[in-house]
């Protein structure tokens, strides 16, 4: 099987919550490409299917992926694609999974050596800040009458139910996702700062 075929199967497994199929396909992928390429490909795939509604389920998928081969979550630190995925999506669920499954196991456990964890978290925090700044330049306003029209009628017999064009509904859903992403990025950066400077 080619890399693209395997990734197609992995996406199918993710969408159908097929953990066994996911693990089998990950084994195939490990034999085809490097850990860095795997990290990039899986981050792209998870980003493609991500919504805040699916965040908890995708965090479980990320857990399976990282447990299968932790190095794909550590390769190219701090610019790791799976970490960047957490920040790009603003998903605190994915971020917590990343920290618990990838970061905690590689940090020194001795309390005497606080410098190493602080530096590790500081490196991640710098990447998160850069991504936040990069994406803040890409924001656009969503103005009623311009980007969407809003409700155009009410349901006969129930004034509390409004009818809306599908395109307008999708625009509002997209705006909500983007808003949640902004809040999530702030939460991730705040948590990293707490880890660096102490809670």
Image (cartoon, helix red, strand yellow):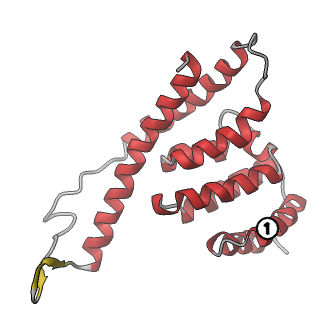
Please state if 145 lies on the left or on the right of 33 as rendered. Answer: left
Judge whether residue 25 can be spotted in this image: yes
Q: Residues within 10 Å of mark 1 (few under 14, many from 20)?
A: some
Task: Give percent across and percent down for residue 48.
Answer: 56, 63
* Rendered view: 143 above or below 188: below
**Residue 15's spot in the image, x, y percent?**
62, 73
Q: Position of residue 174 (x, y in %)?
A: 35, 62
Tell me if I can see residue 129 in this picture. no
> In the figure, 173 relative to 102: above or below?
below
Q: Is residue 40 above or below residue 103?
A: below
Q: Residue at x 71, y 52 (%)?
A: 63
**Quarter of the rendering containing residue 171:** bottom left
Q: Residue at x 33, y 70 (%)?
A: 170
Q: Residue at x 51, y 48 (%)?
A: 91
Q: Is residue 63 above or below residue 96?
A: below
Considering depth in this image, is 181 or 107 the residue closer to the camera?
A: 107
Q: Which residue is mark 1?
A: 3
- From the viewer's side, name the closer residue of 99 and 131: 99
Q: Quadrant of residue 177?
A: bottom left
Q: Quadrant of residue 151?
A: bottom left
Number of marks in the rendered image: 1
Q: What is the quadrant of the N terminus in the image?
A: bottom right
Q: Which residue is depicted at the point 62% across and 54% down?
A: 59
| Residue 156, percent from left and from top | 10, 89
Q: Residue lying farthest right?
A: 31
At numbered mark 1, what does the secondary structure look like: helix, strand or loop? helix
Residue furthest bottom in the image: 156
């Amino acid at each position: 099987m080619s890399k693209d075929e395997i990734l197609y199967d992995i996406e199918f497994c993710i969408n159908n919550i097929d953990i066994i199929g996911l693990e089998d396909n990950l084994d195939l992928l490990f034999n085809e490409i490097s850990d860095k390429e795997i990290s990039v490909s899986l981050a792209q795939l998870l980003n493609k299917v991500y919504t805040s509604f699916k965040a908890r389920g995708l965090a479980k998928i990320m857990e399976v992926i990282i447990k299968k081969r932790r190095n794909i979550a550590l390769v190219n630190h701090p610019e790791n694609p799976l970490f960047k995925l957490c920040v790009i999506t603003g998903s605190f669920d994915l971020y917590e999974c990343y920290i618990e499954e990838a970061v905690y196991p590689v940090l020194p456990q001795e309390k005497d050596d606080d410098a190493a964890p602080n530096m590790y978290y500081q490196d991640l925090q710098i990447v998160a800040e850069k991504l936040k700044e990069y994406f803040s330049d890409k924001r656009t306003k969503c103005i009623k009458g311009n980007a969407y029209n809003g409700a155009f009628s009410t349901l006969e017999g129930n004034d509390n139910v409004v009818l809306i064009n599908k395109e307008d509904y999708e625009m509002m859903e997209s705006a909500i996702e983007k808003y949640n992403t902004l809040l999530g990025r702030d939460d991730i950066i705040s948590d990293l700062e707490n880890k660096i400077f102490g809670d």
